[in-house]
Image: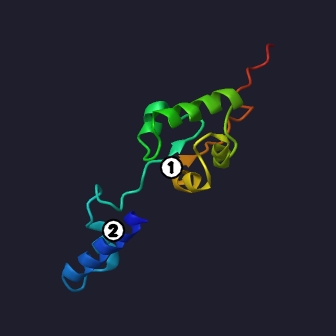
Amino acid sequence: MKYVIASILILLLGAALAPPGLSGAEIAAAIPSGSAVESRPTYDLNSVGREDLLAIRGIGPALADRILDYRARHGAFSSVDELLGIKGIGEKSLTRLREHFTLAPPPSPVANRTPASP
């Protein structure tokens, strides 16, 4: 939420200080890419490693290990909601963490087939 507010403030300040005649798109394009409006990285929940998990605010070493252990025991996640099955992740945590994770589609069975012998 604070990133949304910061983004709005940056755009408003830019509009107030911009020379007359600049469009909103031109003002937005002038914002440096390292600013608060840059999007957060997302990770595939089925391939994310410990170091990337630790980079996410709210995930410490113990929770990162529980996420990886859960995946090792239960196999690939079919939904980000499965994180609720991990000790230390409730509805509030899931809402916050959801923006950091995606699920890549499973590999196609056709792509894994070996050619038939003649």
Q: Position of residue 113 (x, y in %)?
A: 74, 25
**Taking 34 as reference, is 114 above or below it?**
above
Q: Is residue 62 left or right of residue 117?
A: left
Disc 2 is placed on an element classified as helix
Task: Give me the residue at 70% from left, 42% from top.
Answer: 78
Residue 5 vs residue 19, the one in the foreground: 5
Residue ID at (61%, 40%): 87
- Binning the other alpha carbons within 10 Å of mark 1 as few (below 14), some (14 to 19) or many (20 upward) gives some
Instruction: Name the quadrant containing residue 106.
Output: top right
Residue 90 spot, x, y in % from top left = 61, 50
In the orientation shown, which residue stands out farthest toward the bottom? Answer: 20
For the C terminus, which image quadrant? top right
Residue that mark 2 sits on? 6
Kind of element beneath mark 1: helix
1 lies left or right of 46? left
Q: Position of residue 53 (x, y in %)?
A: 47, 38
Label 1 near label 2: C-beta < 8 Å? no
Q: Residue at x 25, y 77 (%)?
A: 13
Instruction: Identify which residue, 62 or 40, lies in the foreground.
Output: 62
Q: Give the residue at the far top of this rendering.
A: 118
Q: Is residue 108 left or right of residue 19?
A: right
Say which mark, if any, is on residue 100: 1
Give the residue at x 42% y 52%. Answer: 40
Residue 18 place in picture, x, y as percent: 20, 79
What label sits on residue 110 in the rendered view? none
Amino acid under label 2?
A: Ala
Query: What amino acid type should be assigned to the residue bearing mark 1?
Result: His
Q: On screen, 79 above or below 7? A: above
**Which of disc 1 and disc 2 is earlier in sequence?**
2
State left or right for residue 20 relative to residue 2. Answer: left
